[in-house]
Amino acid sequence: MALKTYRAKRKFTVTPEPRGQIARGRGTGGNRFVIQKHAARRLHYDFRLELDGVMKSWAVTKGPSLVPGEKRLAIHVEDHPIEYNTFEGTIPKGEYGGGTVMIWDRGRWIARDEPHRAYAKGHLSFDLDGEKLRGGWHLVRMRGRPRDKKEAWLLIKANDEEARGAREPDILDEKPRSAVTNRTMDEIAQGKAFKKKSASRKGARVRTAADAVTRSAVWIPPPRNAVAKPASSRAAALPSFVEPCLATLTKSPPRSADWIHEIKFDGYRVQARFDHGRVRLKTRKGLDWTEKFQTIADALSRLPAKTALIDGEVVVEDSEGHSDFSALQVALKNRDLDRLVYCAFDLLHLDGVDLTRAPQIERKAALAELLKRSPPGDLIRYSEHFDDDGAVVFKHACRMRLEGIISKRRDLPYHSGRSENWLKTKCLASQEFVIAGYEPSEVRQRGLRSLVLGYYEDGALRYAGRVGTGFSHDLARALQKKLDALGTEKAPFGQVPARERGQKVRWATPKLVVEIDFRGWTHDAILRQASFKGLREDKPAREVVREKAVTDARAGNDDHAPTRRLSTSPQAPPSRGRNASNRVEVGHVRLTHPDRVYWADVNVTKQQLAEYYVAIWDWIKPHIVDRPLALLRCPEGTKGECFFQKHIAAGIRDMSLSLAVDAKEKDIIVVKDVDDVVSLVQSGVLEIHARGSTIKNLELCDRIVFDLDPGEDVAWTTLVAAAREVRERLTQLKLESFVKLSGGKGLHVVLPIRGADWDMVKTFTQAMAMAMAADEPKLYVARMTKSLRKGRIFIDYLRNSREATSVAAYSSRARDGAPVSAPVSWQELGRTESAAMYTVQNLVKRLGRLKDDPWAEIRQLKQNLPDLRKLTRS
């Protein structure tokens, strides 16, 4: 449409509307949106999105609705100039569109798909980040009729946390005033002056926390002026080292305006000392690690100053731009120093002036100014801060799967040591622990099964439990070698902890420190669902204590601070809230009809299933994340209609699920976090099935499944013996396998492999099945024919093809009793009673009793398939 139609309809000598120009060269880069309330012949809301240098426009007759699925008619009208975004006033009566216009909302829009293609297709999916409207939205073009003069579209709110129920307040009634002048429609019509809106001490906010969090460490373009030093600074010689300020753990972040907030990094705390071009990098204990971080030192050597002392953190970023401690360790081990990034967040000294007595906000300003004048590059970054409500910043950080946030008092000086001037709030619980010993691996000669952990309290080492996941095979071997060198006969706790008595533990002198993620503590101070992150070489073992969060009051919160919503341990259900529209929040997902019964025979509801997945997230995560999924959906529960779904389509298209698109397949369903799984529960998913490959390489299988499906009259003990037979045959081929209850009738023997093409896998599994059927034809069958299965066990090898799936470990099943597919150890298998003995109602309790994950080593094994000629028994 361009602007030809727009201009033809208006007399710019009469109307105050802008004539405007097309913003040439803007392409898809512009992403502003505006919603103008327009009292013309009929009251409506003009919805405009910036694209190709103009504002694509729709007249929404009833205005936008925050109720998902409530369709609002949007008539596509002529393009408007971008200058129209600032128009608020009255169009003279008798002119086109005559009436009062209010800027009701404005902000930015972010297309979820390529906007030109989506617009042409007639389905724009996007996010709004405005002053009133946020979250996901859809504009969908309706099928036109021959007599229609204008295109009819529908404006629909996506079902996310910004959505509202039908009984909740209407946003149009709740916030009727102008987003710019705070005036009502009548006041605009009467020409009354602007009303002053409340603003922060820094004036209008340039960006929202959601926007700024996505680029928590960025370079700022070089300014013209020199660095202005705070008035409260003083002359002093450059110190060799300043003991760093350490943050105190808090349950929830402060919310008052006295605080600023930064993204918490996951790396090594490093103080950079710059003296006339010479740089020394020291850890928080004063160890000189300049050589280890040489690329960072080289980048800092070009600072435009004589002397400086900077506080920051060395990190390595993952593909999403998040700092990753495990990746940092790998980079250091491989001397891949080009991946290192230094995130600078404080300035303690500059050009002969001590800044530690200056307020935090002034030190940050001086640091930003210094880095603005530095040569641009990718290795040194300024850590931005946010003035928003701490709870808002924290919420966005956790949604983006960041470590958490650091909150700092804006008006206080730098304080060495741990204090409550700096507070840390973590999205996941994590801290350092000391290794007190390990249990050797039962699978490999070299390596370990789990680490025994502890921390110091009153000078004595206290037992904290174990960690058995998070380390690779190579790392497990390296850790064992280090621990064997520190071996000791006595338990370093003084006496062997009750949980470790009778266990095969090799004790070690407590010198190695590790970083651990976990889901909380049990009542007897044992870690829940611990996961290994990496070794910490920058902290002495004696300084490792149990971190305890300060109360909300000490953190400067008010009485209405929201509680933190995190995945919880199996022994503690997640916090949730209910509102008048019968909606419940589990994790960060709102459930509609949470009381809907999914399993009528045992009265298990949608909410209970969602809480089950939140509680066992750490256990199921390795088996479904980044794997193509197939879903069994039963929106009305097991007593209603159920159907399989392999691709994003009706019912789950609005969710924040990742899509894997390649030349062969599109819209593969892939989950990234627990909220994705809870969203699946919301849409009626009762079973999650996973392929034997990851989205990184769909052509290679890395997990083989032998599905042992018993026919009628096959005893459970016979089925257990069959699983052991599969294991024995694989062991003879020097292959280690794992077993799980299917949640149905059978057992699954799972074989992790390094990666093999699907033809090779199919040949291997078929040969295994045929060999067993040939050796014991009265017990095994390798053909699908049901008539052959009575009294026999069908060895289903057909699940091992490119697009085939099998039920994921820990997934629920759409069968009576709400059973789950539960991994067990080979030692435990003989004590099991049926394939459906663990359920949504009792598995959480089982996991709480386990010392180790029975499948802890499945991700560490990288095994190659053997020569098929070895399969046949002699």
Image: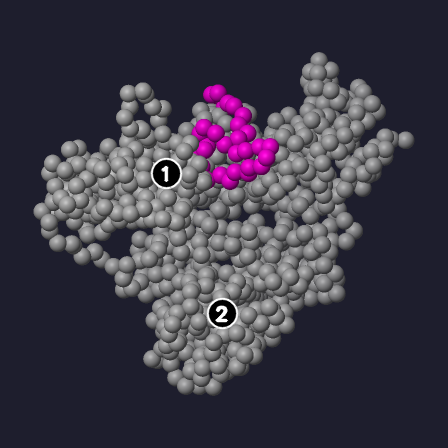
Residue 138 in the image: above or below residue 550: above
Q: Which label belongs to residue 381?
A: none
Magenta segment, which residues? 638-667
Q: Is residue 51 left or right of residue 468?
A: left
Residue 424 visible somewhere in the drawing: no
Residue 556 visible in the displayed image: yes
Up-down: is 492 above or below 98?
Answer: below
Residue 137 image label: 1
Task: Where is residue 241? Give x, y as percent.
Answer: 52, 79
What amino acid does circle 1 point to? Trp
Q: Residue at x 36, y 51 (%)?
A: 562
Q: Position of residue 174 (x, y in %)?
A: 22, 43
Name, please, the residue furthest toward the left. Answer: 190
Kindly indicate the quadrant of the structure image that contains residue 704: top right
Q: Residues within 10 Å of mark 2 (few under 14, many from 20)?
A: some
Query: At 77% from the left edge and 53% from the top edge, which residue is drawn?
Result: 446
**Amino acid marked by disc 2:** Pro
Residue under circle 2? 375
Q: Which of 507/725 is in front?
A: 725
Residue 279 lies in the magenta-colored region: no
- Labels 1 & 2 near each other (Cβ < 8 A): no
Q: How is this picture coloured? A: one colour
Task: List x then y, in percent, for residue 593.
Answer: 38, 31
Q: Find the residue positioned furthest to the top.
A: 787
Asked which secondary structure carries label 2, the reply is: loop
In the image, what residue occupies the spot 28% across and 23% down?
148
